[in-house]
Amino acid sequence: MSDDQSNQRAAAALARLIHHGIAAVPPADLPEDWREAYQAVRAVSGGLFQRQQAFQAAIAGSSFAVHMELEVEDAFDAIPDPPQDSLRVYSAWETLDQPPAQDWCVQGIITRPSLNMLVGAPGAKKTWLALDLAVSVASGQPWLGHPVGAHGNAPSQSSPLVGAGSPRPGIPVLILDQEGGLQRTWDRLGRTLRGHGLAGESLPGVSRADSPKGHEVPLHFIPPAGYNLANPSEVDAIAARARSLKAGLIIIDALVNVMSGVDENNVLSMQPVIANLSRLAREANAAVLVIHHANKRGVFRGSSLIASGVDHMLAIESAPDEDIIHLVTLKARDIAPVSLTAQASFGRGPGGQATFHLTPASTAAAAARSLSPAAGEILGLLQTEPMTFPELTACLADIAPGSIRNLLHYLVTSGHVQRADGGSRGQKALYQLANAQTPIPGAVVPSNPPSPTA
């Protein structure tokens, strides 16, 4: 590469860092003349104005200052502004042709664009699971056996992840960490990158020879910045940043931290937040995954509007002191419910640094999974007598019908429950325990069950 080409590449990287706050390349990849300025701007935690000042200060004493400033200005002109109007109007006759292919973030689990929610109790490893998902998506590695992306929706050939030995390009990821803080997220993300073999280390049981290295993975995070997603202008700012990164997955940790002053139990208060999150997914053409807390029954906390507004809600179940994680659909729109069991591996790499990654759990671990309190209540009701879906929803009136339906789907597929009517089409579904003579751990038998007709 000629000196002119190296300077142009360095100017482009520095312009992007100043304009969008994105460190696209490691400093070591830049010519020596540019490295100090790049590192000075990278160290700034403020906004555009502060980054511009840091750049000017860093080059002030250089004999190449004028040349560098002009190079960066030229590079600025080449950075496209995000589109202000992305509306596409369709005509009815177009629907006579085949619809567009489904765009996946993780096949069978997360579509894009879509709004998704991960709910779980404190200590259930929600953030760890989200970081493992982020690293898998950004590096193009399958997540818990499910491929990332779709064959027809891969990034362009300009992606740094496209090339010999890379089976599938990764999808850029943006994490809004509004709960853990810079040091905590830095540590956990570093552990997860190392756990996926993206730090150049050879890890036992992890074959990542063909994967990109850490600096090639398009994964970015924003530490706590006081976002309030009830405010449309702040959603616009996040959408613009996501578009500048071409992010296909946006992870928000956690819901309660991005809606200051909003009552999660109030429908009118929550409506703008859920609407803005859905708009963020559409405008960024990304899958948005929001981490949220579960109530004591293992169901999402807050207004029923939360469940009705999301495309896929997943419940995570894992005791703080166990390394098995269970993931089950509470509500799904246009995709089949899922039930996954994962093994969490916390360890040390060859250099002694901490690592973390998830792998699909064994069949035995999946079969031995404990039931959520809500699932236990369904089994407890069925231990009394077979019941229809409307009867169950009447008895469990404070649980969303969609959540009950998906819990029933899991209980049927896991062998806990079966159709008492034989399961024929056209018959009203009647559910009973698969083996009424065998007590089921986790089943909660109500002492005085409410009447389904009350």
Image (tube, rainbow, N blue to C red):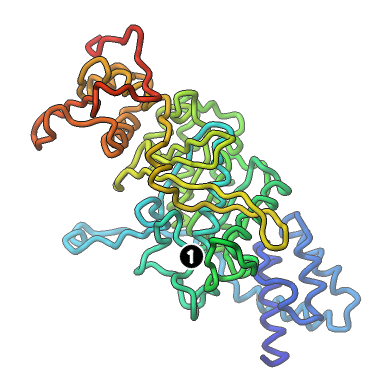
Q: Nearer the viewer, residue 97 or 417?
A: 417
Q: Nearer the viewer, residue 294 or 207?
A: 207
Residue furthest toward the top?
A: 448
Q: Residue at x 44, y 54 (%)?
A: 144
**Residue 30, horizontal then vertical, whole percent:** 73, 78
Q: Quadrant of the C terminus?
A: top left
Q: Which residue is mark 1?
A: 140
- Left or right relative to 199: residue 273: left
Amino acid marked by disc 1: Gly
Q: Nearer the viewer, residue 194 or 111?
A: 194
Q: Residue at x 67, y 73 (%)?
A: 13
- Left or right relative to 426: residue 260: right
**Residue 54, horizontal then vertical, whole percent:** 81, 64
Q: Residue at x 25, y 21 (%)?
A: 437
Quarter where residue 218 is shown: bottom right
Quarter where residue 418 is shown: top left
How many numbered tags mark residues here? 1
Q: Secondary structure at mark 1?
A: loop
- Left or right relative to 231: residue 108: left
Q: Nearer the viewer, residue 148 or 400?
A: 148
Q: Is residue 239 positioned above or below 116 on the image?
A: below
